[in-house]
Amino acid sequence: MEQYLLEMKNIHKRFPGVYALKGVNLCVRPGEVHAILGENGAGKSTLINILGGILQKDEGEIWINGRNEEIHGVLDARNYGINIIHQELVLVPYLTVAENIFINREETKHGLVDFAGMRRKAQRFIDELGLEIDAGQKIDALTVAQQQMVEIVKAVSFQARIIVMDEPTSSLSDKEITALFGCIKTLKARGIGIIYITHRLNELSEIADTITVLRDGASIITKPYREITNDEIVKYMVGREVTNYYTRTSHPIGEVALSVKNLSSAKVHGLNFEVRRGEILGFAGIVGAGRTEAMKAIVGLDEKTDGQIEINGKPIVIRRPADAYRLGIGYIPESRREEGIFPEQSVGFNMVIKVLDQFIKGVHLNKAKETEIIQRYIRELSVKTPSVDSFIKNLSGGNQQKVVISSWLASAPGILIMDEPTRGIDVGAKAEIYALMNDLAAHGIAIIMISSELPEIINMADRVMVMKDGRITKELLHDQLTQEEIMKYAVDI
Ligand SMILES: Nc1ncnc2c1ncn2[C@@H]1O[C@H](COP(=O)(O)OP(=O)(O)OP(=O)(O)O)[C@@H](O)[C@H]1O
Ligand SMILES: [Mg+2]
């Protein structure tokens, strides 16, 4: 039998009120890409945090190269050749690539830090992986994708035998994903085992050798990828058949709710568009096209240099996000976990924070109404939490996002801007979010949706603005929407 690099056997983990892992098994061979799939809260991150020494298991065994080992901390994991690349990157922005790679183990020459030597060594690692990154560059000058590559280079420099990637592609453009996959193939060829967590099933065919599905903390199935279809995977993830994710319902479109004229900021130039009540207006384009920046300029997060915004036909001035909020513009940011939550507060608090004034009658909080709203969204978006009083920081990444989204839905704005609303969200909950969007639109709310997932935007949007390099390059109506048509205006061909 071929030797496994890693065998995690019968892993159990309990948190207060949550039985997060109930006997999970995971085996990885040299040169294998093993994808872990599962709904938000299924236990994926908990499992790899145990492997990485960040969490301690309650029960179970971890075998590395055929030996039963205990991983007591991050350093132990690293000594066993295990490296984890977390979704939130942890590089130091003002240091160079080389300094980041050798951080806390700086090499010295005659008692001084040997910057030139480190840089040469780092560059060699980079070149060997076929990457185009200059080891002397500062981290903050790199794209997110390049920073991720630096994390990989760093892992390789630690002689990693196993590299774990937790949702690595969630903020990458298609071109960057191709580069990442190229890099993964090089690692495979060197016999490194890769554990790959993703919610994007369509990328599995490119890289996955084996898949394991987790559901409610249990291993449901492990199979070679070529022996299973994506539809079957979804069925195992959700525990039921999910047929139609996209269900854009048709209904009348009303008056213009938001009109943007000649909007410019440092990052976007001369944008003109409007969105009507009951309409879902999509914004397509590659990462960096300026879609998020356009929305930030509208809601007062970025400074406008020019342009006029009208709501319901009246010119208005928005200087800061609070102005936008008061005028009925809801904004669900892309980086919800960083910008959207109060980590030290409860799930319930985070859900109703934006609508608290609705519940305050005189000085009495309308507790019943508040509880009703909270219970409704926990149910509709299937937010996985032990209770409404749990700290939001203890929820899985995707479930934190669901809470942020529901807090905006609860505030019932007239205009709702959603930046990548389903990124990091599992398939079952995606369908719920689409249903809620339809529901909001049917109630006359104007929705702007930025999305990099073409099938999503094609199916959900009534109309799409395509952006490239900070400008709108094309407006496409629903029946003109195809992947090819969008890409034609989103990239230089
Ligand atoms: N520190 C903690 N304290 C309490 N509960 C926790 C803690 N960390 C995770 N959990 C719970 O354990 C369960 C599994 O969470 P985990 O983060 O592993 O999910 P996941 O599969 O990575 O989900 P996602 O796709 O949303 O990232 C969830 O119910 C979560 O709320
Ligand atoms: Mg996770």
Image: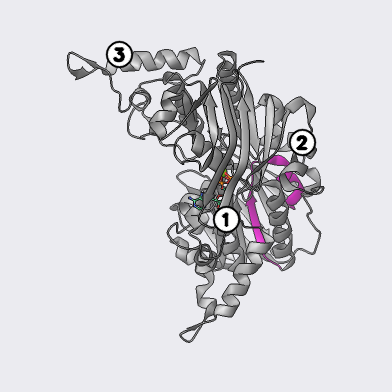
Residue 464 vs residue 199, the one in the foreground: 199
Q: Could you give the CA–CA distance between mark 3 and mark 2, rounded to whole angstroms?
A: 47 Å
Residue 11 vs residue 323, the one in the foreground: 11
Q: Residue furthest left?
A: 111
Disc number lying in front (3 or 2): 2
The residue range painted magenta reads 444-462
Q: Which quadrant, please, contains the C terminus?
A: top right
Circle 2: residue type: Asn
Q: Which residue is drawn at 54% across and 45% down?
A: 13
Q: Name the residue under label 3.
A: 117
Left or right, 94 with respect to 30, comes to: left
Residue 159 vs residue 115, the one in the foreground: 159
- Do we see residue 316 in this rendering? no
Decide: few, some or many residues near mark 3? Use Cα within 10 Å; few <14, some 14-19, many ≥20.
some
Q: Does the magenta stretch include residue 449?
A: yes
Q: Residue at x 53, y 49 (%)?
A: 14
Q: Could you give the CA–CA distance between mark 2 and mark 1, rounded to whole angstroms?
A: 43 Å
Q: Horizontal and vertical percent for residue 82?
A: 48, 26
Please tell me which of labels 1 and 3 falls first in the chain.
3
Please tell me which of labels 3 and 2 falls first in the chain.
3
Q: Residue at x 52, y 68 (%)?
A: 354
Above or below 464: residue 170: above
- Do we see residue 388 in this rendering? yes
Q: Mark 2 points at which residue?
A: 230
SS at mark 1 in the image: strand
Residue 274 vs residue 444, the one in the foreground: 444
Disc number lying in front (1 or 3): 3
